[in-house]
Amino acid sequence: DTAKALTGKRVLITAGPTREAIDPVRYLTNRSSGKMGYVLAEAAVEAGASVTLVSGPTALPSPQGVQRVNVTTAEEMYDAVMGRLNEADIIIKSAAVADYQPENVATQKLKKVGKEMVLRLVRTKDIAADIGKRKEGQFFVGFAAETENVAEHAREKLARKGMDLIVANDVSTPGAGFDGDMNTVRVYDGEGEVLHLPLVSKKEVARRIVDLISERWTGK
Ligand code: PMT
């Protein structure tokens, strides 16, 4: 019975996209709705955990019983997560964090000038990679959104970012990945594939991931 398998455990979950400002009226973002992370938060609460949800901008209501921390940019998400790392037993990173941000944020709205414009981007901090370096016994679950060579890319990220499990979505599968209510995933640990779910609801994906974590969490 895994119904209350996470009682007393503190789970930190990230969800949604980030927004990187270009000027006061424009930003760069991605297609994440936050749905996957929010149902993970619900499933963790149902399993008895105390849940903190660090969320990028979404249109979703807060799940019952969750402590929600709203952030906008990758840098804000980095600070919110790193500041709470020591208080977490389990970390699940389902947010779609920007890899690049504009090098400079214009203080005034950019005007149309020439026929072309160049927007210079610089790398954001990799939250997952730093969790991998700094964690002390926390169980760490990452996500990978891929469009090709899914297993290879996901397993490379798991190893490089020090994750215990990685949930890979093939976001080129129709009806899966970003925004919808369904997903299809393959979960890997350092040895290989540990779970494959065909197209099912994100709620079901979340429950199965929480079950896997419960089975594998051995204590800090
Ligand atoms: O929100 P939904 O609409 O429900 O969609 C769900 C989802 C497709 C967004 C989700 O299932 C998912 O795959 N989330 C991860 C998306 C992603 O950014 O994957 P990635 O392969 O680019 O990054 C790999 C990992 O590194 C992720 O855990 C990501 O949070 C993390 N990362 C990436 C960049 C960065 N600067 N910091 C990070 O921590």
Image (cartoon, rainbow, N blue to C red):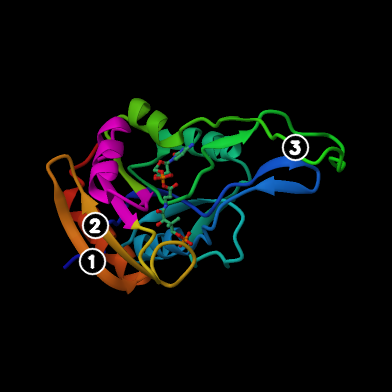
- First-in-chain label (1 vs 3): 3
In the rendered image, the vertical position of residue 138 relative to residue 144, given as above or below? above
Percent x, y of residue 88: 38, 41
In the rendered image, the vertical position of residue 132 relative to residue 153, given as above or below? above
Which is nearer the eye, 152 or 130?
152
Residue 146 falls within the magenta-colored stretch: yes
Q: Which mark is on residue 117? A: 3
For the residues bearing labels 2 and 3, Cβ distance under 8 angstroms: no
CA–CA distance between discs 2 and 3?
40 Å
Span shown in magenta: 144-169
Q: Which mark is on residue 197? A: 1
Percent x, y of residue 214: 22, 55
Which amino acid lies under the numbered mark 2 shown in the image of this protein? Arg
Residue at the (51%, 60%) spot, across then down: 34
On whether ligand 1 comes within 8 Å of the CB at mark 1, the answer is no
Mark 1 lies on a secondary structure that is: strand
In the rendered image, the vertical position of residue 136 relative to residue 217, given as above or below? above
Which is nearer the eye, 136 or 202?
202
CA–CA distance between discs 1 and 3?
44 Å
- First-in-chain label (2 vs 1): 2
Pointer 2 residue: 186
Q: Quadrant of residue 170?
A: bottom left
Q: Quadrant of residue 184?
A: bottom left
